[in-house]
Amino acid sequence: MQSKLNLDQHLISKARGSAKKIAEDIQLFIDNHTTVAVERTIARLLGIDGVDEIGTPLPNIIVDHIAQAGVLNQGIAYFIGNAMIQKGLTPQEIAEAISAGTLDLTQLEMASAKEISEKINAIAVEKTAFIKSNRNKREDYLKNLGEGAKPYLYVIVATGNIYEDILQAQAAGRQGADIIAVIRTTGQSLLDYVPYGPTTEGFGGTYATQENFRLMRSALDEIGEEVGKYIRLCNYCSGLCMPEIAAMGAFERLDVMLNDALYGILFRDINMQRTLVDQFFSRVINGFAGVIINTGEDNYLTTADAFEEAHTVLASQFINEQFALLAGLPEEQMGLGHAFEMNPNLENGFLYELSQAQMAREIFPKAPLKYMPPTKYMTGDIYKGHVQNALFNTVSIMTNQGIQLLGMLTEAIHTPLLQDRALSIDNAKYVFNNMKDISSEIEFKTGGIIQSRAQGIVKEAADMLERIEKDGLMETIEKGGFADVKRAKDGGKGLSGVTTKGEHYFNPFIPLMLGGDR
């Protein structure tokens, strides 16, 4: 890609090099630790599902069982594999027996590590083959049915009732949407379990459950066949159950997942040790399943000033990129986030937004960047809001963004109604069609506002990453280095679910998915 911003490639390489060292330093910690969420995910991937008589998920029951015995550090795969050998049961039957109180995994005679590994690996191979078949099915749809043009038109549904969400999602599909995101109910990210079954109650969104995923996937396939293109499904792979939701999404062929390495730490006060370990396994699963991740840098700009703190967005994009690469995610699956969030009263604000978007495009040329609409300065003036969204769409088509979360003119009033979504899709279609090839027709003035702004941000981001490389990522977060939010290394929610790996620990899915046969 020919640079329109005359960016300093040496500085970009330097920034990327610092981010790589930052991520590799954290990876040493990740490789030596596991969490209750990671172990529940392994249990789910081995086929354990369902709830007990009071609604407690069986993956929680079996992992809590070994945690309470003080042997979480050996990993759930070790104990399930041994129980399969000693009792001749399936993983699901083992979980049900523990739930019924008729089996204690820690009281069984232990087989050799080799025997246990071979027993578990046979199931792990079978389950990863199923996830691969889902990936192949998506690719068949894309090949035979086709997809929308980029930028993909991405809209949300958020009724709280999966059956109502389905009706709204199907309507959006008929209106022209390419990606449907089912907004997750408020507070689910702080639940240390995943609810079960179809749900009809939520607050500002709908519970992320495997059954809800299955229902929505089926509904979008139906509409895709009707309108003649594949419609992608998005949900939230974040919070205390980050890797579990990734596994559920892989089983039900979700296509896009909100999946940021730092978001839960900064905006949900989830312990950073817990989140950094969880994000790795979630991304390994997403990478293997062919899921496009969406990172959450746009959120930084809801708490910090978009003009003053633009370099922190770029620095975070570099870090998210390196964490994703370590988890086996190719650049084509990195929906790195950024947002159109500058104060609309800022003089030349459009030029600065254009500069920021073009800069992200040039630095991450293969990534399907996820561009977020104005929200912070939406006032409820729907006419002005519609204009703000038109400018946002204009920047997107001028800079070749990949995924366009459409702005709603009723932002700041209510969750979108059917007609709000239709107007937003019409707005984007009009701008994208009317300005289709404008990107290839324009250049930016040498030394002008747009070029100078981008060059300055790259310099600030490179300097920031150099400081983080020296100080450490966790220490930088403790000081409030991102989004002006400070979090303690030993604070936040979920730290008790983190433990150092023991001598018998193994996760059978890492070698199969990370760099495995896709």
Image (cartoon, helix red, strand yellow):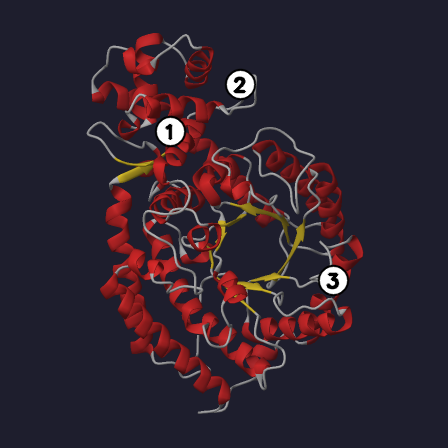
State the residue position of label 3: 410
- Picture layout, residue 452 above or below residue 214: below
Q: Amino acid at mark 3?
A: Thr
Label 3: how many Cα within 10 Å (few below 14, some 14–19, many 20+): many
Amino acid identity at mark 2: Asp
Q: CA distance from mark 1 to mark 3?
A: 48 Å
Q: Is residue 181 left or right of residue 275?
A: right
Mark 2 or mark 1: whose residue is earlier in sequence: 2
> Is 172 rendered above or below residue 75?
below
Residue under circle 1?
125
Q: Secondary structure at mark 3?
A: loop
Q: Disc 2 to disc 1, how far (Cα)?
A: 28 Å
Asked whether the residues under the numbered discs 2 and 3 touch, taking CB atoms below 8 Å apart as contact, a structural biologist would say no
In front here: 348 or 304? 304
Tag on residue 52?
2
Dots 2, 1 in contact, CB < 8 A: no
Asked which secondary structure carries label 2, the reply is loop
Q: Residue at x 57, y 78 (%)?
A: 439
Residue furthest to the right in view is 419
Q: How many numbered discs?
A: 3
Q: Is residue 459 visible?
A: yes
**Residue 114, image x, y percentages:** 21, 22
Left or right relative to 344: residue 242:
left
Residue 149 left/right relative to 331: right
Percent across and percent down for residue 215 are: 65, 35
